Image (spheres, rainbow, N blue to C red):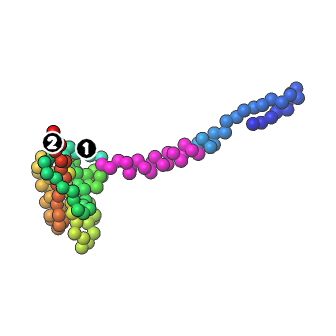
């Protein structure tokens, strides 16, 4: 607060709001949300997985490839052009590594898109291919 002695000699209180701490807090919150938001968005594709009565969990970490009903491919959560899938997969597999791929295909996706992903994976000597499904809820 400032105290003024101008004019009549009486003290006048002039209240001011200091905006700098408010701006600092807002910028820190903005940075936090910018850093956390990519972590929260796991996948950009919405894939409706088929359901099965018997399912089991995978034992090891695998590269995740999602196939949408329109043929859009996402590799590890990032949408990629279909014709670049081979190069991206080849760069992602370390030399001498026995890679595994988990395919999450929409149940309405034409089978040719799934076969395309499997074919490229086998050409690059991927050791294991898996298909992700949801367990069917029995009523």
Q: Quickly name the residue at label 2.
A: 138
- Look at the numbered disc 1 and give the secondary structure of its residue: loop
Dot 1 or dot 2: first in sequence order is 1
Q: Can the viewer see residue 65 in this picture?
A: yes
Q: Which mark is residue 22?
A: none
Q: Residue at x 45, y 48 (%)?
A: 34
Q: Residue at x 24, y 73 (%)?
A: 96
Q: Can the viewer see residue 89 in this picture?
A: no
Image x and y of residue 4, in percent: 82, 33
Q: Residues within 10 Å of mark 2 (few under 14, many from 20)?
A: few
Please determine whether, in this image, residue 16 is positioned above or below residue 48. Answer: above
- Look at the numbered disc 2 and give the secondary structure of its residue: loop
Please determine whether, in this image, residue 5 is positioned above or below residue 30. Answer: above
Q: Residue at x 28, y 55 (%)?
A: 76
Image x and y of residue 128, in percent: 17, 64
Q: Check whether the beta carbons of the residues at disc 1 and disc 2 lie within 8 A of each other.
A: no
Q: Main structural element of the magenta stretch: helix, strand or loop?
A: helix
Please determine whether, in this image, residue 103 is positioned above or below residue 91. Answer: above
Q: Is residue 132 left or right of residue 18?
A: left
Q: Where, quadrant-wise, is the C terminus in this rendering? A: top left
Between residues 89 and 64, which one lies in front from this camera angle? 64
Q: Disc 1 to disc 2, how far (Cα)?
A: 24 Å
Q: Quickly name the residue at label 1.
A: 46
Image x and y of residue 33, in percent: 46, 46
Magenta residue span = 24-43
Residue 33 in the magenta stretch? The answer is yes
Between residues 105 and 59, which one lies in front from this camera angle? 59
């Amino acid at each position: 607060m400032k105290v003024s002695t101008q004019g009549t000699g009486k003290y006048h209180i002039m209240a001011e709001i200091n905006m700098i701490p408010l701006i600092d807090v807002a910028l820190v919150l903005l940075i936090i949300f910018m850093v956390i938001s990519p972590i929260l968005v796991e996948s950009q594709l919405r894939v409706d997985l088929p359901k099965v009565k018997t399912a089991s969990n995978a034992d090891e970490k695998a590269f995740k490839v999602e196939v949408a009903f329109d043929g859009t491919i996402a590799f590890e959560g990032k949408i990629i052009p279909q014709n670049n899938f081979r190069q991206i997969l080849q760069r992602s597999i370390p030399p001498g590594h026995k890679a595994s791929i988990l395919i999450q295909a929409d149940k309405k996706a034409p089978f040719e898109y799934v076969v395309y992903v499997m074919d490229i994976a086998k050409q690059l000597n991927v050791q294991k291919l898996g298909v992700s499904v949801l367990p069917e809820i029995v009523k």
